[in-house]
Image (tube, rainbow, N blue to C red):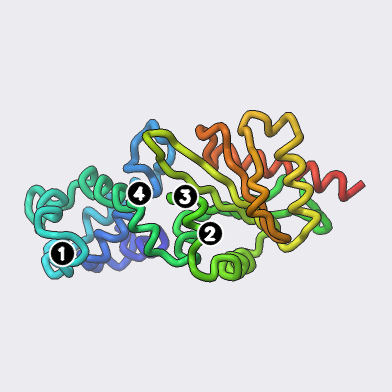
Amino acid sequence: TELLLDDQSPGGNGNKIDGSLGLLLLGVILLDSVNMIPAAGKGTDRDERAISTLGERTDWAQISVLSPSIADASVFDKIFPEGRARSPSQDALFDLLSGARNDPKFWAGLSTLDSLRIDYKRFEVPGSLKSSPIRTIGLSSVLTDMDSLLSKDNFENDMRDYQSSCQVDLFGALTLEFVDGNLNRELLLSSPKVGVLEGVTNYLLRDKDAASIQLNEREDLRTASKRVFRQGNAKCSRKQVAPLLQRAALSLNLKSDL
């Protein structure tokens, strides 16, 4: 998003941005930055500049030609409270997209590939060597329950293909769902290296460092290349899980390098 906007910045060519494209780009930035809410701590100065550029360069009047299948007229009236020739309401757009992203029907309609890549992040393992078994970790956040994710067509093969394309030694998917107002989280881990999967699993289930996340393996879902865990502590998101997996990897790497 930001690279695309670089050419449209004040120092770029100054061309107008298509209204439909501008709205999509703005939506991506708002979702990724949690609507630039300071308490979320995700919005950056670069995000702020990109939003400003979109506001200045986008021809919002072109929004009128958007397909009604994207949203009905009443929704667009909320997004553009001052008319479609003026800038959209960031709050209204964020609320619409955030609600859609949390809609079970939205996730049910996605393929395995789209489910895994829509919110993916890659992490390096500090201090790893070329010979270390785990140098990189990839984690996808998926806003659906684990069983629904696993039941997608050709899930196992598509997941392995995606993991291979990401070129990581350990891949994970974090799922979440609300049940009767309570948040449930589960963690899937996958690796083509059996020793890596076994070593990380042992660390997560036995090391005191992992006790706070309260993981329990779903052994009925165990395969040669994947493990699935229930999280007793649902407050632990990717922000807490990623550093834990990095420490697990570091522990395994140190033993391997001895």
Q: Residue at x 55, y 32 (%)?
A: 233
The residue that mark 3 highlights is 145
Left or right of 27 on screen, residue 237: right
Name which residue type carries label 3.
Asp
Disc 1 marks which amino acid? Answer: Ile
Q: Nearer the viewer, residue 200 or 130?
A: 200
**In whole angstroms, how far apart are the C-alphas of marks 4 and 1?**
25 Å
Q: Residue at x 22, y 65 (%)?
A: 20
What label does residue 63 carry, if any? 1
Q: CA distance from mark 2 to mark 4?
A: 18 Å
Image quadrant in which the N terminus is located: bottom left
Between circles 2 and 4, the one closer to the viewer is 2
At horizontal 10% and vertical 52% (from top left) the residue drawn is: 77
Q: Position of residue 52 (x, y in %)?
A: 27, 50
**Helix, strand, or loop for circle 4?**
loop
Whole-angstrom CA distance, mark 1 to mark 3, is 35 Å
Element under disc 2: helix
**Nearer to us in this view, 220 or 90:** 220
- Percent position (x, y) of residue 41? 43, 36
Residue 251: which quarter of the image? top right
Identify the residue shown where x is 18% and y is 47%. Answer: 89
Identified by mark 4, the residue type is Asn
Among the two numbered marks 1 and 3 on one chain, the one whose residue lies closer to the N terminus: 1
Disc 4 crowd rating (10 Å Cα; few below 14, some 14-19, many 20+) is some
Q: Which residue is mark 4?
A: 102
Tell me the mark number nearer the camera, choosing from 2 and 1: 2
Determine whether label 4 and label 3 are within 8 Å by CB.
no
Q: Quadrant of residue 18?
A: bottom left
Quadrant position of residue 254: top right
